[in-house]
Image: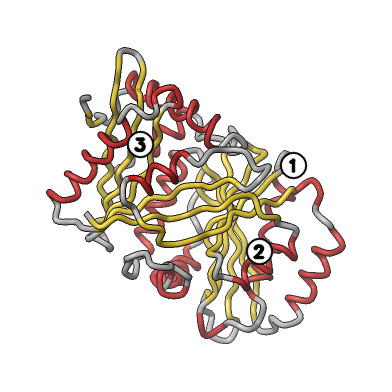
Amino acid sequence: MRVEIYDKGDAATLDLIHATGRAAFAVDRPSVPLADRDAFAAIMDDDRPTGEHLLFHVREGDTVLGWVKLDLPLADNTHSGELWGMVHPEHRHRGVGRALLDAAIAHMRAQGRDTLQAGAQEPLPGGGGSFDGARFLAAAGFQRALEELTSRLDVTTVDEAALEKLRSEAWSKADGYELIQWTDGVDGEPPAEVLDGLAALLNRFFTDTPMGDLDVTDLNYTPERLLADNASAAKGGRRTFNSAVRHRESGQVVGWTKIHIRSTAPHYGMQGITMVSDGHRGHRLGTVLKVENLRFMREREPELTAIDTDNAVSNTHMLAVNVAMGFAPFQNAVFYQLKV
């Protein structure tokens, strides 16, 4: 079985890789839309200087049996790599996944990296999907390192009165803070006034967020890196709705949340980061951020019907905020780790 590395810009091969992704998503994550072909190409042709991105695939005739994308950080966490991959449902249990994993591990070792991480979903009853990814990682020797819960908000059934009550109560504890909101990605860059604050929040992400047993070190973000990430998101057709809170007295941005959406799947949003600086907790800023950002997005995305969010099961505070907003458990999401 021959494993090849995708040459960036090879449109014909990428068509086959994307087709395999669509087939896999239909089985593994049927209610989550895979990025459309152009957005998928932007993800796979990623050229940001903060990471190396390799796409391994196994091909048989006009079918790509499976593929894995190996992301290797260059600005931080240079001991590690992260995998994202799929095997076509009709070609599983043939050693395709193992061959792809072996190729990724060999590349990791050649670079002197020792920690490989990958995520997998585990459906809850009635949620749809498969356990194939989780079973493969466990059989390959990966250890469960971070347990998360994916919760889903049915936007069409939101309790408006309860949400407004939650918003009002949260703001009553947040005196001295103000809200900043914007969209970026395909809509342009984040405002310059927030860049330093967002970078500072990201640099504390692995310290301030529950990370279980994942072997990670602090991120190394700058305003320039944030802008590069935003340019990459724009290439992928992604619009991001952002809300931040600024401490009036100091002028510092001390909290941030965001939700992503693509124009080709306007019904589906994916919650991204939600962070509040350690010294500003206890003012219900996390609730302010999430409720206000949901409101901001719904006013501008009339076709939106569902938002998914992932949180560590140990993050009981944020899980409680989700429940109060109307989110319900949808599936388990597990980060696995392998020392290579």
Q: Callout 3, which amino acid? A: Met
Instruction: Report helix, strand or loop for mark 3.
Output: helix
Residue 172 shown left or right of residue 1 in the figure = right
Front residue of 42/124: it is 124
Q: CA distance from mark 1 to mark 3?
A: 30 Å
Place of residue 101 in the rendered image (x, y in percent of width and height, measured from the top left)? 27, 40
Q: Earlier in the sequence, mark 3 or mark 2?
A: 3
Q: Earlier in the sequence, mark 1 or mark 3?
A: 3
Which dot marks residue 19? none
The residue wearing badge 3 is 44
The residue wearing badge 1 is 302
Q: CA distance from mark 3 to mark 2?
A: 30 Å
Q: Callout 2, which amino acid? A: Lys
Q: Callout 1, which amino acid? A: Pro
Quadrant (top left, top right, bottom left, bottom right) of the C terminus: bottom left
When asked about the image quadrant of residue 47, the answer is top left
